[in-house]
Structures are given as C-alpha cells and as structure tokens.
Image (tube, rainbow, N blue to C red):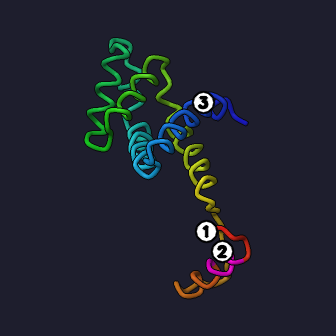
Amino acid sequence: MSDLTTAARPYARAVFEMAQEAGKLTEWSAQLAAMSAVVAAEGSSALLAHPRMTKEQKATVFGEIAGDALDEQGRNLLKALAEHDRFVLLPEISTIFEQMKAEAEGAIEAEIISAQEMSDDQQQTIAAALQKRLGRE
C-alpha cells in the first residue's frame, strides 16, 4: 500500500459516507473526476505549489479552474485539502471513492482479453453471463 493510498483513504471514506447519506454518489464521482483532472493538468502542480500563494488562494484558484463541476461541498473539500497541502491526493481519493461506490452498488469490473476484437453483442453476452453467475453488475 502506498503512502498516497494511506493518506487518501480517510478523505475518500469521509466523502463516500457523506455522498451515500445524501444520495449523491454519482455527483461526487463527477466532482472527484473533475478535481483529479485539474491536478493532472499540465502546469497545475507548479501553480498549486507556488510559495507566494496562500492556502486559501490555492483553494480558490483550484475551484475557479474546476468551475461549475464543483458544488459547495466540493469546494469545502478543496479547502480542507489545501489546508494540509494535500491536492496531490485527489486522484487517489477518486480511485478509492470509486472502489467504495462499486462495492456499495454491488458492481464489479472485469477485463476481457481476446485474441480478436469482440463485437458489442459478444461483450454484452459475456457481461450478462457474469452478472448471472456472480449476482452482481
């Protein structure tokens, strides 16, 4: 387990519990994906690490870059992460959140490796067989 995973897990768990209680798992998936995209964007790490910017300014700039993709709670998460210089955790928070969401929804992810490209019908047939066999989506 990486240090990022260890540090990200409490944030992911808190966001997941809040989102699940509010019935907003899908909305939070989108917000975390948007935040992760900002972290991954070229030049963002230099901007967010700029020594002359306060933590509040970093959270504000980050929120402006993310734009309408974030609601008030998403912006509050940014403030909490900024307070502890933890923006780098966002991709891992998103990954852990998605794992928790899939588990809560009873979903699993399967990868099919085939020698030839599979048609959509073939993929759907395999997906249906897995759903029936495993009792999950």
Asked if residue 111 lies left or right of residue 39, the reply is right
- The residue lying toward the viewer, choosing from 13 and 117, is 13
Within 10 angstroms of label 2, few (less than 14), some, or many (20 or more) residues?
Answer: some
Taking the spot 69% from the left edge, 70% from the top edge, the residue there is: 135
Range of magenta residues:
127-132
User: Is 130 part of what is drawn in magenta?
Assistant: yes
Q: Residue 131 carries which label?
A: 2
Give yes or no for contact between labels 3 and 1 (Cβ–Cβ under 8 Å). Answer: no
Q: How far apart are the alpha carbons under marks 3 and 1?
A: 27 Å
The residue carrying mark 3 is: 10
Q: Where is residue 24 in the image (x, y as percent from the top left)?
A: 43, 47
The residue carrying mark 1 is: 137
Q: Position of residue 4 (x, y in %)?
A: 62, 32
Q: Where is residue 104 in the image (x, y as percent from the top left)?
A: 60, 52
Q: Hey, what amino acid is under mark 3?
A: Pro
Give yes or no for contact between labels 2 and 1 (Cβ–Cβ under 8 Å). Answer: yes
Q: In this view, does 114 lie above or below 56?
A: below
Asked if residue 34 lies left or right of residue 133, the reply is left
Q: Which quadrant of the rendered structure holds the N terminus?
A: top right
